[in-house]
Image (spheres, rainbow, N blue to C red):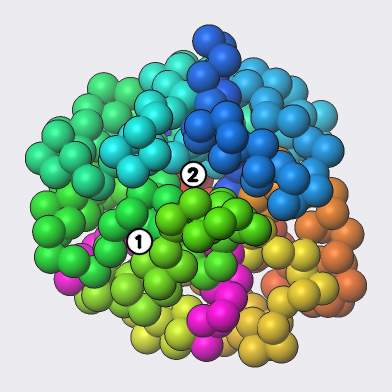
């Protein structure tokens, strides 16, 4: 796949948020069933309403920030078709100065998921894929998903995979049936080992498995960590130290908007008092390098 994203110039933004949910499309369809969407909003105590792709672009443009945008396709497990990836990508093209689209497919759909991943990459031009093992109800280490990850590896695109605790289903009876164990980052160690040319981004501080995530990112050249979903003032000390030193080239700024706003994240990130060189790497430079945004 070609590098970069047409119309996006990283020199024209001050930072890149690699974890932004666009969970509603122009028809009003949401990523999750309404009851689950409402429960998540209550859990996060967020006043931020879901934004369409164009509204998301306006938000980030006003902040001179680039954003990787996506939805999550958990059609089989949720019995709910999510907001349209095609709509999301079309919107990202309209707003290519600030938005970079990732695709999403339902791993439980087998060969159909592989073909859909190829379609989204080749026909739509997505620049990566988002997965949430707990919500999508799949174990990424299961050999059944080798064809899907191999196809994405061959396309030359990264995967961004939820790890650790999740707000989805939190506080509900049985957690809506979502299993936290599927989001143990150690399951992604198998993926990174089997697919050495597939960049694997472990999303979020991986509570309660932070040491596992740090170990994987240290051991596997193709494993990365995004820092979204948690205020930096709550980061475990081991993560703060790793991001400051030996993993500074492999960690990425992400907010988890709308669950956590970039303003809140950045305000608390400043409290860590990282050197300017490290801040620049985390806030933009690492994402430019990983996503090939500087072009050929």
On screen, 224 above or below 160?
A: below
Residue 293's disc is 2
Circles 1 and 2 in contact, beta carbons < 8 Å: no
Q: Earlier in the sequence, mark 1 or mark 2?
A: 1
Q: Residues within 10 Å of mark 2 (few under 14, many from 20)?
A: many
Residue placed farthest to the top in the image? 27
Q: Nearer the viewer, mark 1 or mark 2?
A: 1
- Residue 29 left/right relative to 20: left
Q: Is residue 32 positioned above or below 58 on the image? A: below
* Prevailing SS of the magenta stretch: loop
Residue sitting at x 37%, y 67%: 182
The quarter of the picture where residue 181 lies is: bottom left
Which segment did they paint magenta? 194-211
Q: CA distance from mark 1 to mark 2?
A: 15 Å
The C terminus lies in quadrant: top left
Name, please, the residue furthest toward the front: 173
* Residue 199, numbered label: 1
Check if residue 131 falls in the magenta segment.
no
Query: Which residue is at a point 12% across and 59% down the rendered structure image?
Result: 144
Q: Is residue 197 magenta?
A: yes
């Amino acid at each position: 796949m070609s590098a970069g994203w047409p119309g996006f110039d990283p020199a024209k933004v001050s930072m890149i948020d690699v974890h932004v949910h666009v969970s509603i499309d122009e028809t009003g369809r949401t990523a999750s069933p309404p009851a689950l969407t409402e429960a998540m909003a209550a859990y996060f105590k967020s006043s931020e309403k879901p934004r369409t792709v164009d509204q998301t672009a306006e938000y980030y443009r006003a902040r001179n920030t680039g954003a990787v945008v996506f939805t999550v396709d958990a059609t089989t497990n949720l019995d709910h078709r999510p907001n349209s990836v095609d709509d999301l990508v079309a919107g990202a093209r309209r707003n290519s100065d600030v938005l970079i689209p990732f695709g999403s497919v339902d791993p439980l759909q087998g060969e159909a998921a592989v073909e859909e991943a190829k379609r989204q990459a080749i026909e739509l031009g997505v620049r990566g894929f988002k997965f949430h093992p707990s919500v999508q109800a799949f174990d990424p280490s299961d050999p059944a998903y080798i064809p899907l990850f191999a196809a994405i590896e061959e396309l030359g695109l990264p995967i961004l995979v939820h790890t650790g605790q999740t707000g989805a289903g939190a506080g509900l009876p049985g957690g809506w049936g979502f299993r936290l164990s599927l989001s143990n980052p150690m399951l992604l160690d198998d993926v990174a080992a089997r697919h050495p040319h597939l960049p694997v981004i472990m999303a979020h501080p991986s509570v309660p498995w932070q040491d596992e995530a740090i170990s994987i990112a240290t051991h596997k050249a193709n494993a990365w960590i995004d820092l979204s979903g948690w205020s930096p003032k709550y980061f475990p000390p081991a993560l703060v130290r790793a991001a400051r030193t030996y993993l500074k080239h492999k960690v990425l700024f992400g907010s988890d908007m709308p669950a956590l706003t970039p303003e809140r994240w950045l305000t608390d990130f400043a409290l860590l008092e990282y050197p300017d060189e490290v801040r620049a790497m985390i806030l933009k430079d690492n994402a430019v390098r990983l996503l090939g945004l500087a072009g050929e």
